[in-house]
Image (tube, rainbow, N blue to C red):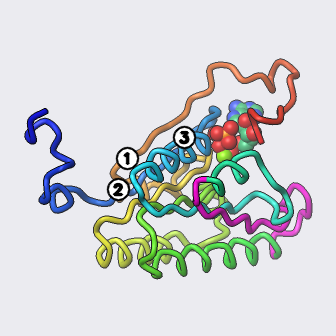
């Protein structure tokens, strides 16, 4: 095993890496799953991870919450029941702001190496948060912490996200070819939640 091949063992490896801004988007399944998979991998390398979920209800527990907490990964669900429950845009904006405030707190804490903002892209595409303010904050944090990795997810890829896509290092679009929902198969425990 030469040190040349296994370069992550070298002392200067960290100097040659940079924190990535990664976006998981598109209408197919797998955006949150891929973010969770990355956290599982990162936790195995002792990276401190935290996921903040914009859309899930505060009171709901999902399979991934049980697993991630066993790995020492923090998960915060901030949603209060979004539009489809409340039809209350003012409430949705308020919840989005409170959730983003927690994202900012976690970013600025300098305590993490990987942060996942689940459904941030959805909230941005609906205009619930100001994209320019979000980008300015992310820029400032990344300038201060060049090794911090950030993943944002959400299905809508629209013009509102263009500026963020330009900033990102990695953008993956999940494309639906088939989804069981369209065959009348409902969400299943262990697969969807
Ligand atoms: P997952 O959490 O399974 O990785 P996702 O993050 O890609 O899915 P979301 O847009 O967050 O998908 O959708 C939330 C829920 O809707 C998930 O349970 C997911 O399985 C389901 N879903 C994803 N894509 C589709 C689709 N094309 N049609 C219907 N339901 C979908
Ligand atoms: Mg998701």
Q: Nearer the viewer, mark 1 or mark 2?
A: 2
Q: Give the number of the disc on residue 78.
A: none
The x and y percentages for residue 191 are 74, 32
**Which residue is at a point 14% across and 59% down the rendered structure image?**
11
- Tell whether circle 3 marks a residue whose Cβ is less than 8 angstroms from ligand 1: yes
Q: Which numbered disc flags the more N-terminal residue, 2 or 3?
A: 2
- Is label 2 in a helix, a strand or a loop? loop
Q: Residue furthest front?
A: 1
The x and y percentages for residue 61 are 81, 54
Tell me if label 1 and label 2 are in contact, CB under 8 Å. Answer: yes
Q: What range is drawn magenta here?
A: 71-90
- Tell whether circle 1 marks a residue whose Cβ is less than 8 angstroms from ligand 1: no
3D distance between C-alphas at marks 1 and 2? 7 Å
| Residue 56 placement: quadrant | bottom right
Q: Which residue is more in the foreground, 170 or 165?
A: 170
Q: Give the number of the disc on residue 170.
A: 1
- Is label 1 in a helix, a strand or a loop? strand
Residue 16 in the image: above or below residue 155: below
Image quadrant containing the C terminus: top right
3D distance between C-alphas at marks 2 and 3? 15 Å
**Label 1 packing within 10 angstroms: few (<14), some (14-19), many (20+):** few
Q: Which residue is more in the foreground, 29 or 62?
A: 62
Residue underneath mark 2: 20
3D distance between C-alphas at marks 1 and 3? 13 Å
């Amino acid at each position: 095993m030469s040190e040349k091949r296994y370069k992550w063992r070298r002392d200067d490896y960290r100097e040659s890496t940079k924190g990535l801004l990664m976006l998981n988007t598109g209408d197919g399944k797998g955006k949150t799953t891929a973010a969770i998979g990355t956290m599982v991998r990162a936790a195995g390398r002792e990276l401190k991870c935290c996921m903040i979920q914009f859309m899930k209800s505060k009171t709901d527990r999902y399979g991934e919450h049980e697993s991630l907490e066993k790995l020492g990964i923090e998960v915060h669900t901030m949603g209060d029941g979004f539009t489809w429950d409340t039809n209350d845009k003012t409430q949705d904006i308020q919840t989005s702001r409170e959730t983003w405030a927690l994202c900012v707190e976690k970013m600025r804490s300098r305590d993490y190496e990987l942060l996942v903002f689940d459904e941030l892209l959805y909230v941005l595409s609906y205009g619930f948060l100001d994209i320019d303010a979000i980008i300015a904050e992310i820029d400032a944090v990344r300038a201060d912490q060049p090794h911090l990795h950030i993943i944002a997810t959400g299905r809508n890829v629209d013009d509102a996200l263009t500026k963020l896509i330009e900033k990102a290092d990695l953008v993956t679009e999940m494309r639906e070819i088939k989804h069981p929902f369209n065959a009348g198969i409902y969400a299943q425990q262990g697969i969807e939640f």
